[in-house]
Amino acid sequence: MKKVFFLLSSILYSQNTYQGQVLFEYSGTENGSFTSTLIDSTVSGFSFSQTDGDSSSFLIASVTQQDDNEFDLFLAVLQDTSYPLEPRIWEIPGEGDEDNPLSLESLVVFLPRLDSSIVDELLDIFSGTANDDDSSDVLTSLFGSLSNSLYLGLQGELEIEAVTDSSVIGSFNAVLIKPAFYFPPHTISITNGEFQFFDVELPMLNSTIENGSSPNYFEISSVYPNPFNSATNIEVLINSNNENTSLCIVDITGREVQTIFNEKMETGRHLFSWNSNQNPSGIYFSVLKTNNSIKTKKLMLIK
């Protein structure tokens, strides 16, 4: 099972990131509707596309809230995709050695009725706000502890139906089984599955160097808590006080919602707070700019 979690964590460091929705009905040992939303209609679907040498992968990760303390998590990993993505159909599970998940062309995982504290940690990773150095270890530990709760795709089909420069749309149906021994076996049937994802790589957020290498070092060293409910702290590190520096918050469309700081910043660590009471739930970005460069961090506001 650790091989599966290593694969999932490696795909997080991807070349294209999308946000969107996953929708489906499920029945069997567990019954319910998956609507890819949290409190206050927060969209909680993410997908990642990457290429590594001659191979490419596509990951779908999404969470839905069933009540105040329980959540469902859906994951799909598609390997040997084209890069950039193109429409295609995958059988579930895909071709390969079923005893070695890394060899499968497709892998579907569903974890119903998770505790909210576990989901907070997963969202931190999948929204890109976790420490990259820790993501692999966190995923392995979390999923290892949940091995008796997860369902794996036994049969079915997943199709990427349409791909544009900024979107990925598809559908799926599947039968999943719980690998842990039960008699009779615990199974779930997923029907009417569909997903829609849209590119969140906003041009204004790309890091740029206009005049050669910048002699000054600066970064958004941490954002906490994240995800957050109303306010979060943004820590900035800078080693030069000679440049004008701005720190602002933008939404997923690229619209600036608040300027937190905009003047010369002295050398050292600086802590800023963003109170988001006037903003709806969703994905935001903290954007740190100097004359030559831009640094960003994703934020997830959940009300």
Image (cartoon, helix red, strand yellow):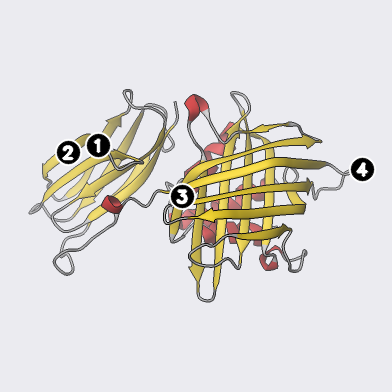
User: Where is mark 4, residue-wise?
Assistant: 183
Residue 297: give x, y in percent of width and height: 34, 47
3 or 2: tag closer to the N-terminus: 3
Residue 70: give x, y in percent of width and height: 63, 29
User: Where is mark 2, residue-wise?
Assistant: 261
1 or 4: tag closer to the N-terminus: 4
Residue extending furthest left? 242
Q: Is residue 244 above or below residue 299?
A: below
Mark 4 secondary-structure assignment:
loop
Q: Which mark is residue 131?
A: none
C-alpha separation, residue under disc 3 versus residue under disc 2: 28 Å
Tell which tag, 3 or 4, sits nearer the viewer.
3
4 or 2: tag closer to the N-terminus: 4
C-alpha separation, residue under disc 1 versus residue under disc 2: 9 Å
Tell which tag, 1 or 3, sits nearer the viewer.
3
- Splitting the image into 4 quarters, where does residue 111 fall? top right
3 or 4: tag closer to the N-terminus: 3
Q: Nearer the viewer, residue 116 or 137?
A: 116
- Residue 62 located left or right of residue 183: left
Please say if the residues under marks 1 and 2 sit with CB atoms less than 8 Å apart: yes
C-alpha separation, residue under disc 1 versus residue under disc 4: 55 Å
- Identify the image quadrant of the C terminus: top left
Residue 184: give x, y in percent of width and height: 92, 42
User: Where is mark 3, residue-wise?
Assistant: 18
1 or 2: tag closer to the N-terminus: 2
Please say if the residues under marks 3 and 4 sit with CB atoms less than 8 Å apart: no
User: Where is mark 1, residue-wise?
Assistant: 272
Mark 3 residue type = Tyr
